[in-house]
Image (cartoon, coloured by chain):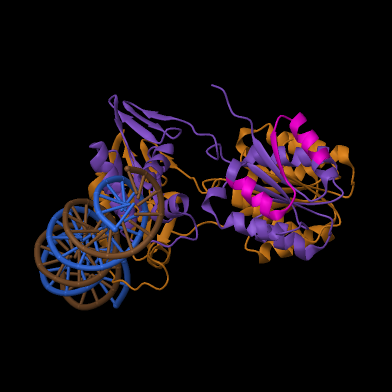
Chain colours: A orange, B purple, C blue, D brown
Amino acid sequence: METNPIKILIADDEPDIIEIISFHLTKAGFEVFTAKDGSEAIEKAQLYTPDCIILDIMMPKRNGFEVCEYLRSNKQFDKTLIVLLTALNDEASHIKGLELGGDDFVNKPISPKVLVSRITALFRRIQPTASDNKLIQVKDLVIDPTQYKTILKGETHILAKKEFELLFLLASQPGRVFLRNEILSQVWGNDVIVGDRTIDVHVRKIRAKLGIDCITTVKGVGYKFDY
Amino acid sequence: METNPIKILIADDEPDIIEIISFHLTKAGFEVFTAKDGSEAIEKAQLYTPDCIILDIMMPKRNGFEVCEYLRSNKQFDKTLIVLLTALNDEASHIKGLELGGDDFVNKPISPKVLVSRITALFRRIQPTASDNKLIQVKDLVIDPTQYKTILKGETHILAKKEFELLFLLASQPGRVFLRNEILSQVWGNDVIVGDRTIDVHVRKIRAKLGIDCITTVKGVGYKFDY
DNA sequence: AAAGACATTATCAAATTGTTAACTAAATAA
DNA sequence: TTATTTAGTTAACAATTTGATAATGTCTTT
């Protein structure tokens, strides 16, 4: 199964700063979102639930301290790393930023490479289960990737690895049709070649084990999760 | 329950620096140890297993980079926070320090208060399993890491070191599947290479010694604790 | 130096899982 | 309707993964 890239949100009112930091973070393999002021930062944080947020202290609408304080008051952002960025180099704000729940405090001007290094170092320390811990629940069906098991009407059903990964993929976007090619590349990988009937057989086994009709065939196209 | 104070080791060849930082850290509630050069830092680290080590880069005997590299090559210090301190303010050493496994890199002169803030912020982030040995209890099974023993139905079972660590890891998050890779890096460390069957053999021994079925195999994926 | 405990490896057996093939059923297009 | 394509079913087989056991090496203790 593929793992999603780590998401980072940058909030700064200077477009130049945004651009250069974005560039380096993207190059380092992160998925980058941006915001130009404090209010937008909060909106985008709620929209994308990034794993790390870089906040300039001095921003319009809401400053970095306020955004930091807001994020820390929400359990949703418990695990989100917050890096504060500022041109002010005074001890008091440094300490204030950390006490408000910031994970790092960096003075401008900052070398983008150093910033990327620092963020990477922070990620080394936090639990790996931070962002890819997505349990799927639809009605009385629970699909739990951390336990590799599915619970239907309170009853646990053990699926084999490929079966589970296939079901998890389809259920990750209920209703959306996955082409056979997509399924192959996501579950089997791009360099594995398997025959035409392989997917069908796995679908059949899932249907049999769960005993419900949660995977719908879209003839000539692919399969979708529907329950 | 009484919790032990957090232990911090400071290594710097300037007595003045040691003194002022010690003072502030002690005031903040940490238990402080000191070393005047790199070799002494390693000795004291092994002796006291501190939770955090502050290393000056330029020290006699062994410099901070060398000490950092040495510590990081030892699984014993996996969870130990390392803060690098230097008067050199160049990008290259900053990045080098973080890449060698440092958790923070701070330029002198540094306000002691800011340093204490930064260290406190780092401790907020690390997983609680670091050095605080918490007892795990599930039904009639007790796993006690302070004594390295397990008690099942009132009867004590002595597991070997690796067996115990493996069981402790799995039981720390009951139900969650640990991939073989995760198990290897958590129990054996990142740089140790052991064969395919090693984990299995240890699992088998745990099952045999405890005589209960508390570790479930998830074929092709890993193992989980389930009891 | 010998004995014992532990960690690791090797080997093979056993079980599970994945894939294919052959055939049947169903849907679609001509 | 009939031909054609696509999907479902089943069973057989291949591949993979794990379990069990013994053997080896290493380290500590006596």
Give the quadrant of the N terminus of chain A: bottom left
Place of residue A162 in the rendered image (x, y in percent of width and height, measured from the top left): 32, 57
Residue B28 is covered by the magenta coloring: yes
Residue at 55 percent across and 47 percent down: it is A131
- Magenta: main secondary structure equals helix
The image quarter in which residue A19 lies: bottom right
The image quarter in which residue B10 lies: top right
> Against B114, is A225 above or below?
below
The magenta segment is: B19-46
Residue B63 is covered by the magenta coloring: no
Q: Is residue B157 left or right of residue B12?
A: left
Residue at 44 percent across and 30 percent down: it is B135
Q: Is residue A207 left or right of residue A25?
A: left
> Against B75, is B225 above or below?
above
Q: Is residue A90 left or right of residue B227?
A: right
**Residue in the foreground of this view, choosing between A83 and B60:** B60
Place of residue C15 in the rendered image (x, y in percent of width and height, measured from the top left): 17, 53
Place of residue A143 in the rendered image (x, y in percent of width and height, measured from the top left): 38, 43
Give the quadrant of the C terminus of chain A: top left
Q: Is residue A192 left or right of residue A104?
A: left
**Residue in the foreground of this view, choosing between C24 and A99:** A99
Spot the residue most to the top: B1
**Residue in the foreground of this view, choosing between A174 and B95:** B95
**Residue in the foreground of this view, choosing between B43 and A105:** B43
> Against A72, is B189 above or below?
below
In the rendered image, is residue B192 in sight?
A: yes
Place of residue A86 in the rendered image (x, y in percent of width and height, measured from the top left): 85, 48
